[in-house]
Amino acid sequence: MNEEQYKNLRNSLNVRNGVLQPNNIPDDVFQVKWPGNIAFTVHGNQNYGWFYVERNQQQVSSVFHFRKSPDLRTVGIMQNLIDEAETGKYNNKKTLSDKIRDVIEQRQLTSCMNNTKWREMLDDIIEIPNLTIRYKSLFDEAEPESSWKIADDESLRYINLSEIEWFKIDDVTREYSRKGLLLDPEVIEENVKDKIERILEKHAIYYEYEADSGVFTVFCYK
């Protein structure tokens, strides 16, 4: 973190009995730690930042954002989070991993994926132009109604992949080309079934294929 910003936070905040970490943590981080793997963490630089309380390196409080250097109101929110962490409010707060484990146990699911397979699969299928996908998390009550282009899915870059229940891939891609304001766009379709099969089999990923709908389903839990 920028040395000036680090000093400003250090001078503005009372870390109570927490231990302020030195300004040499990667990723522009200002951090205060307590026993039990509890930490108050600020990420940021001179232009933008965000902060929260974490347990076991997983967020357990709300996330707050700020622009440039934190103002008095933002510092007040930071101090409140530190005070809450000091009183033990977050000691037993469930992390995302805890919540995922609860759902798996309640529904008696078995994991079929791991992070390595996820990354390998995603790195390969994103290279297929205009590929459309959809997926459902363990916490979604309803299934998504339609597919969307994987290249447009910003949340997939940040979501904890362990919370995805299943992942569906359409075996046909479509590219739309406009010929004029009054004409319907031309649709160029490509069957990519073989490409997808090769990728899934290359990484030994369990899947099912529905010929009628032309959809591959990768089961993350079953």
Image (spheres, rainbow, N blue to C red):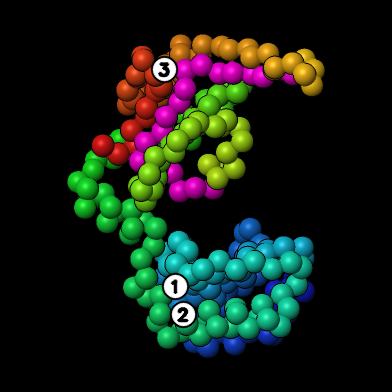
Residue at mark 3:
214
Is 85 inside the magenta-drawn segment?
Answer: no
Quarter of the image where one finds residue 179 = top right
- The answer to whether residue 192 is above or below residue 92 is above
Is 30 left, or right, of 142 in this rendering?
right
Is 172 inside the magenta-drawn segment?
Answer: yes
- Marks 2 & 3, CB-CB < 8 Å contact: no
> Main structural element of the magenta stretch: helix, strand or loop?
strand
Whichever of labels 2 and 1 marks the residue nearer the N terminus, that label is 1
**Which mark's residue is nearer the viewer, 3 or 1?**
3
* Kind of residue indicated by mark 2: Ala
Whichever of labels 3 and 1 marks the residue nearer the N terminus, that label is 1
Mark number displayed over residue 85 = 2
Is 185 left, or right, of 96 in this rendering?
right
Of helix, strand and loop, which one carries label 1?
A: strand
- The answer to whether residue 95 is above or below residue 192 is below
Of helix, strand and loop, which one carries label 3?
A: loop
In magenta, the rendered stretch is 158-178
Query: What x and y, as percent, mark residue 205?
Result: 36, 26
Q: CA distance from mark 2 to mark 1?
A: 7 Å
The residue at the point 59 percent across, 18 percent down is: 174
- Marks 2 & 1, CB-CB < 8 Å contact: yes
Which quadrant holds the C terminus? top left
